[in-house]
Amino acid sequence: MAQALINVPKRAGRGDIIEIKTLISHVMETGYRRTAEGTVVPRNIITSFACRYNGTEVFRADLFPAIAANPFISFFAVATASGTFEFEWIGDNGFTQTAQAAITVE
Amino acid sequence: MRALGTITIGLLLISACEVASKLQATEIAPTERRSGFSFMSPETQAMQNDDTANPGMLWVLDGEALWNSKAGAADKACADCHGDARVTMKGTAVRYPSFDPALGRPVNLPQRINLCRARHQQAAPLSSESRDMLALDAYVAMQSRGAAIDPGGDPRLEPFIASGRALFMQRRGQLNLSCATCHDDNWNKHLAGSAITQGQPTGYPLYRLEWQSLGSLQRRLRNCMIGSRAEAYDGDAPEMVELELYLMTRARDMPLETPAVRP
């Protein structure tokens, strides 16, 4: 039941710097832990995150095993035109999750 | 002679302990009560206050989906009986644990959810720390966010509150600590780098950064018991419900924060 929470301002003035916050549900299992029986718990992490603004990539991040569960990623963008922000998380075992948020620029 | 001396010293020690235990265990005055929130760093407080940064909201979203999905042999969803949780579950969590007449004892919110599953949905019970149980619990409890904790005046609960209080005051474990030793007598001090809080149950189930997950009050209580090297009760043990009941009585009128964030 992967879920994502996105916070993008609904409205912004042209040229404004806006903060975008994203939170996704993921265990981020490092691959370094062992069970009580000594077997390694296989790695299961998100490996990359990208944000596209009206089709143009404006932010990208690579994620690694040291990142805690339920990664929270926040960054800034310049509001240039009305449209949508598209978010995509890609991870181990074929994990993908996408989300969208609309913005009106005046 | 030496044996006699040892016995005397032993007796002196015992009487000293008795005096000490009578001096301690002063309960917190209502005006001095503080949520664990006020002991946290501004960054962690900001995380709790922003619903898009609070990881507990991920469980709330899952809980909302579960609330509306059919389960069990009766093929009923929670919503089929209870309707819109945002209306019907408002102010519910602040009244728990509450007395269940059929069982003749108080039940907490997760236990109530399982009773509902058994009696009305004919579904298998959810285990206490499972993601689904935490999600439903968080979703229901969040509807009372901001409401004052009000464990009610049901006279049938009185003996259970009294035994909860006795459990809170009772020293246990190899370190011989009671809950009250830290959370009544020494709050506002530090244990290593961590603040000792008052142990107010205002935000459960809550997201603990240390757990990297949502967890129940029972999980937190078990942590504390294991930390004081006592044998911890099972999450579903009646003692846990009695302790929860006493804690809720102790926190009467404090606002509920579910889902809270703690370090």
Image (cartoon, coloured by chain):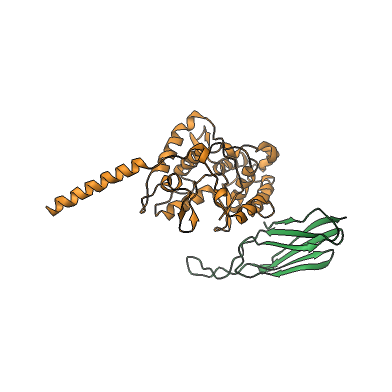
Chain colours: A green, B orange
Compared with residue B124, is residue A20 higher up or lower down, i.e. above or below?
Answer: below
Q: Is residue B29 left or right of residue B138?
A: left
Q: Is A10 in front, or is B57? A: A10
User: Taking A46 as reference, is A54 left or right?
Assistant: right
Residue nearer the viewer, A25 or A37: A25
Number of numbered tags placed on the structure image: 0
The reply to whether residue B127 is visible in this rendering is: no
What's the residue at 25%, 48% (across, down)? Answer: B13
- Give the residue at the far left of this rendering: B1
Q: Provide residue B86's location: percent of width, then percent of height.
A: 69, 40
Instruction: Between residue B123 and residue A77, name the one nearer to us.
Output: A77
**Relative horizontal placement of residue B33, taking residue A93 as reference (left or right):** left
Q: Position of residue B190 (x, y in %)?
A: 46, 54
Residue A43 lies, in percent from the top left, at 60, 69
Which residue is drawn at the image coordinates 44% and 33% (left, top)? B159
Q: Please tell me which residue is depicted at 15% across the width and 52% down the height of the picture.
A: B3
Give the x, y percent position of residue A21: 72, 58
